[in-house]
Image: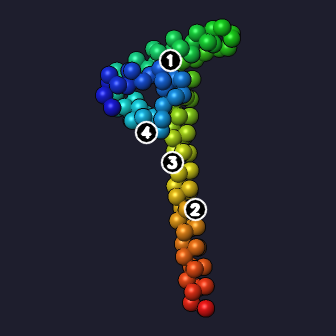
Amino acid sequence: MDCKEFRSLIRTFLDDSLDEFKLAEFLDHYDECEDCRDELRIQYLIYEGLERLESGDTFDVDRDLADLMELERKRLRGRNAFKKTAIASEIFTVAAFLIVMTVILFYQ
Ligand SMILES: [Zn+2]
Protein backbone atom coordinates (compact mmCIF):
# COMPACT_ATOMS: atom_id res chain seq x y z
CA MET A 1 0.00 0.00 0.00
CA ASP A 2 1.36 3.46 -0.82
CA CYS A 3 0.72 6.76 0.95
CA LYS A 4 -1.92 7.85 -1.51
CA GLU A 5 -3.99 4.72 -1.00
CA PHE A 6 -3.50 4.86 2.75
CA ARG A 7 -4.85 8.39 2.90
CA SER A 8 -7.80 7.56 0.70
CA LEU A 9 -8.70 4.75 3.12
CA ILE A 10 -8.44 6.65 6.40
CA ARG A 11 -12.13 7.48 6.47
CA THR A 12 -13.09 3.90 5.66
CA PHE A 13 -10.77 2.71 8.41
CA LEU A 14 -12.32 5.06 10.96
CA ASP A 15 -15.76 3.90 9.88
CA ASP A 16 -14.53 0.39 10.58
CA SER A 17 -15.40 -0.69 7.04
CA LEU A 18 -12.09 -2.07 5.72
CA ASP A 19 -12.03 -5.71 4.75
CA GLU A 20 -9.35 -7.78 6.46
CA PHE A 21 -6.89 -7.73 3.55
CA LYS A 22 -6.99 -3.97 3.29
CA LEU A 23 -6.92 -3.66 7.07
CA ALA A 24 -3.73 -5.74 7.24
CA GLU A 25 -2.07 -3.60 4.56
CA PHE A 26 -3.34 -0.46 6.23
CA LEU A 27 -1.85 -1.42 9.60
CA ASP A 28 1.45 -2.39 7.93
CA HIS A 29 1.72 0.97 6.26
CA TYR A 30 0.78 2.68 9.50
CA ASP A 31 3.73 0.98 11.20
CA GLU A 32 6.29 1.91 8.58
CA CYS A 33 5.27 5.43 7.50
CA GLU A 34 5.55 8.34 9.88
CA ASP A 35 3.86 10.82 7.53
CA CYS A 36 0.78 8.66 7.33
CA ARG A 37 0.70 8.15 11.08
CA ASP A 38 0.55 11.93 11.43
CA GLU A 39 -2.15 12.14 8.78
CA LEU A 40 -4.26 9.48 10.47
CA ARG A 41 -3.83 11.24 13.81
CA ILE A 42 -5.17 14.49 12.36
CA GLN A 43 -8.11 12.79 10.68
CA TYR A 44 -8.87 10.86 13.84
CA LEU A 45 -8.72 14.04 15.88
CA ILE A 46 -11.29 15.67 13.59
CA TYR A 47 -13.47 12.62 13.17
CA GLU A 48 -13.54 11.33 16.73
CA GLY A 49 -12.96 14.67 18.44
CA LEU A 50 -16.13 16.19 17.02
CA GLU A 51 -18.23 13.29 18.23
CA ARG A 52 -16.70 13.43 21.69
CA LEU A 53 -17.24 17.16 21.83
CA GLU A 54 -20.94 16.62 21.24
CA SER A 55 -21.24 13.85 23.80
CA GLY A 56 -19.07 15.74 26.32
CA ASP A 57 -16.65 12.83 26.84
CA THR A 58 -13.02 13.51 27.58
CA PHE A 59 -10.75 12.88 24.65
CA ASP A 60 -7.05 12.07 24.63
CA VAL A 61 -6.20 11.68 20.98
CA ASP A 62 -2.88 9.85 21.43
CA ARG A 63 -4.12 7.40 24.01
CA ASP A 64 -7.41 6.77 22.24
CA LEU A 65 -5.76 6.35 18.86
CA ALA A 66 -3.24 3.90 20.32
CA ASP A 67 -6.17 1.96 21.82
CA LEU A 68 -7.94 1.92 18.47
CA MET A 69 -4.88 0.64 16.58
CA GLU A 70 -4.36 -2.07 19.19
CA LEU A 71 -8.02 -3.06 18.96
CA GLU A 72 -7.82 -3.30 15.16
CA ARG A 73 -4.69 -5.44 15.37
CA LYS A 74 -6.38 -7.78 17.82
CA ARG A 75 -9.44 -7.97 15.64
CA LEU A 76 -7.31 -8.88 12.64
CA ARG A 77 -5.43 -11.56 14.59
CA GLY A 78 -8.71 -12.88 15.95
CA ARG A 79 -10.19 -13.21 12.49
CA ASN A 80 -7.12 -15.01 11.17
CA ALA A 81 -7.17 -17.38 14.12
CA PHE A 82 -10.84 -18.02 13.51
CA LYS A 83 -10.16 -18.84 9.88
CA LYS A 84 -7.43 -21.32 10.82
CA THR A 85 -9.76 -23.01 13.29
CA ALA A 86 -12.48 -23.25 10.64
CA ILE A 87 -10.08 -24.84 8.14
CA ALA A 88 -8.74 -27.24 10.76
CA SER A 89 -12.23 -28.40 11.71
CA GLU A 90 -13.07 -28.88 8.03
CA ILE A 91 -9.99 -31.04 7.52
CA PHE A 92 -10.90 -32.99 10.62
CA THR A 93 -14.43 -33.61 9.32
CA VAL A 94 -13.14 -34.86 5.97
CA ALA A 95 -10.54 -37.08 7.64
CA ALA A 96 -13.15 -38.54 10.01
CA PHE A 97 -15.45 -39.23 7.06
CA LEU A 98 -12.68 -41.04 5.14
CA ILE A 99 -11.79 -43.16 8.18
CA VAL A 100 -15.42 -44.14 8.71
CA MET A 101 -15.82 -45.03 5.02
CA THR A 102 -12.60 -47.10 5.08
CA VAL A 103 -13.75 -48.98 8.17
CA ILE A 104 -17.18 -49.66 6.67
CA LEU A 105 -15.69 -50.91 3.38
CA PHE A 106 -13.00 -52.94 5.13
CA TYR A 107 -15.38 -54.82 7.43
CA GLN A 108 -18.01 -55.65 4.85
ZN1 LIG B 1 2.64 6.71 3.94
Q: Are marks 4 and 3 in contact (CB under 8 Å)?
A: no
Q: Amino acid at mark 2?
A: Ser
Q: Earlier in the sequence, mark 4 or mark 3?
A: 4
Residue under the point 37% across and 31% down: 29
Looking at the image, is mark 3 or mark 2 earlier in the sequence?
Answer: 3
How far apart are labels 2 and 1 at the CA level? 39 Å
Task: Please determine whether, in this image, residue 65 is positioned above or below residue 100.
Answer: above
The 10 Å Cα crowd at callout 3, few under 14, some 14 to 19, many 20 or more, is: few
| Residue 93 seen | yes
What residue is shown with label 3?
80
Q: Earlier in the sequence, mark 3 or mark 1?
A: 1
The kind of residue tagged 3 is Asn
**Distance Cα–Cα, label 4 vs label 2:** 23 Å
Ranked by sequence position, the earlier of labels 4 and 2 is 4
What amino acid type should be assigned to the residue bearing mark 1?
Tyr
Tag 2: Cα neighbours inside 10 Å, few (<14), some, or many (≥20)? few
Q: Are marks 4 and 2 in contact (CB under 8 Å)?
A: no
N-term-proximal mark, 2 vs 1:
1
Outermost residue toward the right in this view: 56
Badge 1 element: helix
Label 2: which residue? Answer: 89
> Cβ(mark 1) to ligand 1 < 8 Å?
no
Measured as percent of width and height from the top left, residue 2 is found at 31, 28
**For the residue carrying disc 1, how many other residues have a C-alpha within 10 Å: few (<14), some (14-19), or many (20+)?**
many
Identify residue for label 1: 44
Placement of 49 over or under 76, stated as above or below: above
